[in-house]
């Protein structure tokens, strides 16, 4: 189909999925362990392994239930009718209507990886992700060409992750994977080959690996007396310290991408697997020239170009330009720094339907923040790079 605007970062979180999806499809011995919806005194909640995962029908996973006058973007979504007529994200017709409102032709769908990684039992987690991958593949197939999804893959065993990635690549409508690496025992910068089964599978299957914000972040100490970051963000009647914490912590979230960018390159993965591709999901873009310059500088200064064995064949920045990409929704730096960031490394995304996103104002945001780009470059950023990266239309 003809694409003019593609969102390289949209969502289909656990919060909106059918409440019995996993119980209906899990092996009998896992039916009470996999995620399912239960009614509580606080309303409908997702639970798994006997513990609460989050709100059913919320703003997104990790967010509270929607209400007016809590956030500017949520109010805009109310005004545009998003909260009318049932859960828009999983209703193909309503979702397409929302895309038309926003001027978006197709979306890349991030899934339930963050929620799933709260499941501790490895068998339960693997079964949960398999069920989701099959369900979202059918969702995408229902409107060919409008949606392509990222697979959810486990991280407790790189070979298990590689096996699920290979299986997902054969389903047809999954074109990459989302990897939740926070809290892993084995950091991704390791050069000992621990992660190589996954990087190798990603390269061979042409399935880019995404690292999305929410799976990491620069930590800001909690306010005095606070014990839970989530409650500080979502609780009613926040204190002045709570509000200041939000104002300090939230702007730093996208900078978590700097750790993934440096780690994946220093691990040697890009050198060993030239066909491997990685994406920094919703990580912004304006900081990237600074980081890749610092990588090059310190790579030389610390004699890593001499001491790494095996050596990296290229400068760190050259791996970024060859194999990396980042998504953003509202970053004015792109308008003036696209060449330094990489015109082929930028993918705009609406972040629909998260309250951090720009729906239903994407057309206006694109014009305001990227209006000075040459038409050829703008088309790459809002369409062609995502189409190429995820083999859309194939």
Image (cartoon, grey):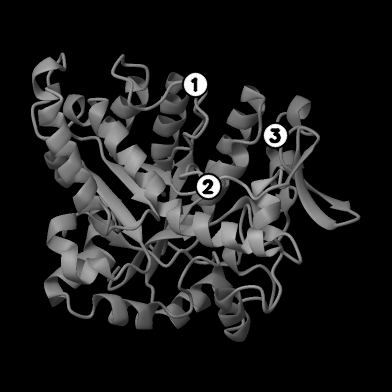
Using the image as rendered, state which of residue 175 and residue 114 is in the foreground.
Answer: 114
* Residue located beneath label 2 in the image: 220
Q: Distance between the residues labelled 2 and 3?
A: 39 Å
SS for dot 2 = loop
Q: Distance between the residues labelled 2 and 1?
A: 22 Å
The earlier-in-sequence mark between 2 and 3 is: 3
**Label 3: few (<14), some (14–19) or many (≥20) C-alpha neighbours in 10 Å:** some
- What mark, if any, has residue 26 been given in the picture? 3
**Label 1: few (<14), some (14–19) or many (≥20) C-alpha neighbours in 10 Å:** few
Q: Are marks 2 and 3 in contact (CB under 8 Å)?
A: no
Picture quadrant of residue 88? bottom right
Q: Distance between the residues labelled 1 and 3?
A: 28 Å
Using the image as rendered, state which of residue 281 and residue 207 is in the foreground.
Answer: 281
> Could you tell whether 225 is left or right of 103 in the image?
right
Going 16% across and 75% down the picture, which residue do you hit?
Answer: 373
> Could you tell whether 157 is left or right of 282 in the image?
right
């Amino acid at each position: 189909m003809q694409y003019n605007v593609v969102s390289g970062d949209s969502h289909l979180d656990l919060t909106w999925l059918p409440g019995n999806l996993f119980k209906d499809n899990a092996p009998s011995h896992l039916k009470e362990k996999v995620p399912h919806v239960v009614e509580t005194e606080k309303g409908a909640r997702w639970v798994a392994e006997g513990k609460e995962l989050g709100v059913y029908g919320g703003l997104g996973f990790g967010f509270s239930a929607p209400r007016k006058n809590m956030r500017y973007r949520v109010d805009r979504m109310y005004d545009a009718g998003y909260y009318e007529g049932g859960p828009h994200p999983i209703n193909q017709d309503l979702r397409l209507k929302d895309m038309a409102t926003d001027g978006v032709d197709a979306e890349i769908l991030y899934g339930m990886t963050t929620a799933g990684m709260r499941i501790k039992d490895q068998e339960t987690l693997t079964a949960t992700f398999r069920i989701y991958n099959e369900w979202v593949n059918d969702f995408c197939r229902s409107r060919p060409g409008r949606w392509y999804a990222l697979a959810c893959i486990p991280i407790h065993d790189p070979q298990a992750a590689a096996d699920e990635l290979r299986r997902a690549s054969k389903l047809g409508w999954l074109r990459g994977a989302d990897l939740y690496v926070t809290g892993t025992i084995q950091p991704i910068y390791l050069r000992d080959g621990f992660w190589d089964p996954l990087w190798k599978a990603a390269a061979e299957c042409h399935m880019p690996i995404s690292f999305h914000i929410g799976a990491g972040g620069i930590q800001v100490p909690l306010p005095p007396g606070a014990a839970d970051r989530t409650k500080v963000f979502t609780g009613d009647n926040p204190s002045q310290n709570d509000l200041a914490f939000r104002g300090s912590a939230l702007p730093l979230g996208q900078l978590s991408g700097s750790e993934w960018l440096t780690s994946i390159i220093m691990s040697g993965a890009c050198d060993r697997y030239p066909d491997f591709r990685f994406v920094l999901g919703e990580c912004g873009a304006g900081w990237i020239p600074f980081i890749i310059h610092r990588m090059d500088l310190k790579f030389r200064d610390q004699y890593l170009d001499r001491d790494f064995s095996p050596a990296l064949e290229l400068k760190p920045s050259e791996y970024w330009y060859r194999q990396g990409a980042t998504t953003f929704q509202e970053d004015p730096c792109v308008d003036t720094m696209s060449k330094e960031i990489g015109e082929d490394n930028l993918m705009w995304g609406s972040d629909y339907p998260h309250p951090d996103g720009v729906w239903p104002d994407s057309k206006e945001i694109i014009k305001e923040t990227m209006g000075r780009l040459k038409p050829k470059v703008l088309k790459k950023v809002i369409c062609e790079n995502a189409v190429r990266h995820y083999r859309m239309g194939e």
